[in-house]
Image (tube, rainbow, N blue to C red):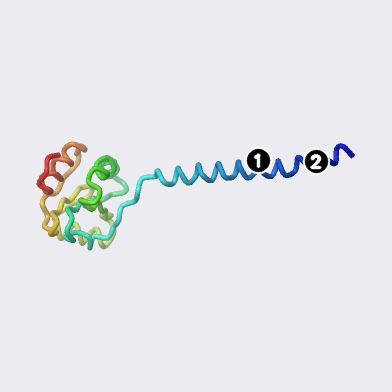
């Protein structure tokens, strides 16, 4: 009889521990998702809508594209709300049209002013510092 009482008391405690563990891992997963890098929009119609825009022409097979994306990741929080960071893939119809219209090429960054006027094409290699200088020049501020 004593064993039955112990089992009756232990069962709710086991359920509580199970739910605490589940809640802990759910919170941990939510925290991890919140800290993932935000994605980039491929909506090129946002160029010229009142913000400076930086468009990465990405080639998934080129290391330079990944280097440029990492560099963009390093500076985009600094310009949050002021600069649109966009991307297009060179091997898509949209990407090919963008390249043709702007004289860009694979693994390049195209920098536009707030009115959508192409300011400069940046070719790799680039650094976060050089990109900050180019963006600051278009914004008319110090880097």
Residue 122 relative to residue 26: left or right: left
In terms of image quadrants, where is residue 127? Answer: top left
According to the picture, the residue beneath numbered tag 2 turns out to be 7
Q: Position of residue 4 (x, y in %)?
A: 85, 41
Q: Earlier in the sequence, mark 1 or mark 2?
A: 2
**Quadrant that contains the N terminus:** top right
Circle 1 crowding by C-alpha within 10 Å: few under 14, some 14–19, many from 20: few
In terms of image quadrants, where is residue 50? Answer: bottom left
Q: Position of residue 63 (x, y in %)?
A: 29, 41
Circle 2 crowding by C-alpha within 10 Å: few under 14, some 14–19, many from 20: few
Residue 92 relative to residue 31: left or right: left
**Quadrant that contains the C terminus:** top left
Residue 52 vs 128, above or below: the answer is below
Name the residue at 18% across, 61% down: 49
Q: In the structure shown, which secondary structural element does the residue marked by tag 2 occupy?
A: helix
Name the residue at 13% across, 48% down: 139
Q: Foreground residue, 132 or 94?
A: 132
Name the residue at 14% across, 59% down: 116
Q: Position of residue 31 (x, y in %)?
A: 45, 43
According to the picture, the residue beneath numbered tag 1 turns out to be 17
Q: Foreground residue, 30 or 129?
A: 30
Give me the C-alpha separation between circle 1 and circle 2. Answer: 15 Å
Q: Position of residue 93 (x, y in %)?
A: 26, 62
Work out whether residue 111 can be spotted. yes
Q: In the structure shown, which secondary structural element does the residue marked by tag 1 occupy?
A: helix
Name the residue at 12% across, 55% down: 118
Residue 33 relative to residue 104: left or right: right
Q: Are the two marked residues, 1 and 2, in contact with CB atoms closer than 8 angstroms?
A: no
Q: Which mark is residue 78?
A: none
Residue 19 relative to residue 55: left or right: right
Work out whether residue 57 can be spotted. no
In terms of image quadrants, where is residue 142? Answer: top left
């Amino acid at each position: 009889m004593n064993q039955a009482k112990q089992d009756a008391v232990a069962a709710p405690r086991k359920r509580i521990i199970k739910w605490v563990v589940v809640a802990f891992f759910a919170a941990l997963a939510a925290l991890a998702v919140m800290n993932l890098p935000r994605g980039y929009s491929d909506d090129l119609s946002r160029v010229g809508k009142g913000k400076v825009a930086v468009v990465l022409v990405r080639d998934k097979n080129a290391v330079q594209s990944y280097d440029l994306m990492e560099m963009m990741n390093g500076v985009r929080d600094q310009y949050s709300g002021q600069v649109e960071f966009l991307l297009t893939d060179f091997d898509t119809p949209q990407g090919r049209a963008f390249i043709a219209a702007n004289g860009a090429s694979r693994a390049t960054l195209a920098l536009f002013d707030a009115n959508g006027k192409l300011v400069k094409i940046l070719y790799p290699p680039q650094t976060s510092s050089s990109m900050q200088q180019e963006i600051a020049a278009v914004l008319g501020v110090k880097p």
